[in-house]
Amino acid sequence: MSKTTDQSNINTPLQKEEGLNRTIGVWGLSANIVNIVVGAGIFVLPAIVAAGLGSASLVAYLFCGFLIALIMLCFAEAGSEVTDSGGAYTYIESAFGKYPGFLTANLIMVAALSADAAVANAVADILTVFIPVLNTGWMRILFFLVIFGGLAWINVVGIRSGIRLVLFTTTGKLIPLLLLVLIGWKDVTGSHLVWESFPSLGSIGEISLILFFAFQGGEVGVSVGGEVKNPQKTIPKAIFIGVTGVLFLYILIQTVSLGVMGDTLASYPENPLAEVGNRVFGPVGLTLITLGAAVSMFGNLSGEIMNEPRVLFAAARDEVIPPKVLARVHSRYSTPHVAILFYTSVAFLLAVIGGLQALMIASSATVLLVYLGVALSVIKLRKRVPGDSKSFRIPGGYTVPAAASLVILWFLSHLTGQEALGMAILIAVLTGVFFGMRWIRARAEIQPEKSPVITEIK
């Protein structure tokens, strides 16, 4: 499907008619972004960062905040110019065509599905503290069926239902974290926050590489672009609110955790915030933060299931991936119901199996490659969308997308050999599939028509 602008109005961004309802506003989309980004990671990050940088941990947060800001600015511009569903896939496919779009859609799906299966298992594991029977095989499978089946139903009946659940889980995960920050200040010891020395650039880069992945997910939140009201203004505002909110929350949590625990924070790598909660609130704090972690993981899962099927929907709509049935929109609810049901079914199966380690290894590089594609798509799309367009433009010309591209390449240079090899194999397989499909279609189109049979009537 070709990408064309409306010649009757040059201020119209690149957009297709999808049949979806635009009902998501600024705060709904902001909550969606926060819900996706603030997942299970924040409940273990403070110990990991403290172990590497000690009291100077905040340097890594500020550094990662700056890097993710560059990348999300690129998402803000691309999202205001290409206002359909699909997020990063749609931006890259609109800018560069079907092959990059095919790679992007599949790489996002590989990372998202394996991650969702892992998160579902993590929710089950953490709830075994309260529900030991979840350790048994059939009860665990039933638990996964209820989670994925329930989330599929909620999202099929309407995007409003999905957004309401996102708002609920976002509130549920933020309340214990905000209580920990607000009440925990009384137990902060100033000497625990004093820097003994400024960390080296190498150590900052090493820890930031780990921490950076905790800021990922904002790009998933804009996959519902086809259902956002006034996307040229709503998407940039929501990205700014969401990313800024997450950065401040992370910094406050790290400050309180260090201030309360000091050097001992690094000694609790499994669930450091639960130990901080125990110090601040007593035994009830341990329960509060543990439940908060479960809600956070469930919220992350609900956000993924609301957003990721839109990538499948968009790719099938553009005939980039088969089958075309994935692009169907429900006649009553106006949601991509087939894509939602397909995605949740695969995620359920992977959760039952236990997740695929090889795919998890490749997922980190996958996200970075997708980010690189979006940064480059900003440069390409600027040449296609008129300069007087109403869409958001990053100040400074091409400085931000160019800087974001260099940062991403720097991150990719730190991948292990195993990660790089896994990604190369995955891309090679997907490339073979894409060109194999194209060859089959080309052969079908050029099949010579059969000569008509002429029957002589005597």
Image (cartoon, rainbow, N blue to C red):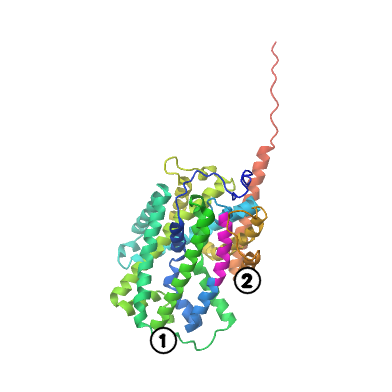
Q: Main secondary structure of the magenta part?
A: helix
User: Quarter of the image containing the C terminus?
Assistant: top right
Is 271 included in the stretch rendered in magenta?
no
Residue visible at 40% across and 76% down in the picture: 272
Residue 71 is covered by the magenta coloring: yes
Read off the magenta span. 66-80
Give the residue type at disc 2: Trp
In depth, the one of 334 and 130 nearer the eye is 334
Q: Which quadrant of the figure has residue 71?
A: bottom right
Q: Position of residue 212 (x, y in %)?
A: 53, 70
SS class, disc 2: helix
Q: Quadrant of the N terminus?
A: top right
- In the picture, measured across the screen, residue 285 lies left or right of residue 355, that is left
Q: Dot 1: few (<14), some (14–19), or many (≥20) neighbours within 10 Å?
A: few
Task: Give the quadrant of residue 419.
Answer: bottom right
Front one among 307 and 113:
307
**In this view, 44 is above or below 13:** below
The amino acid type found where label 1 is placed reads: Gly
**Whether residue 432 can be seen here:** no
For residue 110, side relative to residue 373 (left or right): left
Q: Which percent across, then down, holds residue 334?
A: 45, 44
Residue most toward the front? Answer: 388
> Residue under circle 1?
190
Sequence-earlier tag: 2 or 1: 1
Q: Secondary structure at mark 1?
A: helix
Which residue position holds label 2? 410
Q: Are marks 2 and 1 in contact (CB under 8 Å)?
A: no
Q: Position of residue 347 (x, y in %)?
A: 45, 55
Residue 13 x/y as whole percent = 59, 50
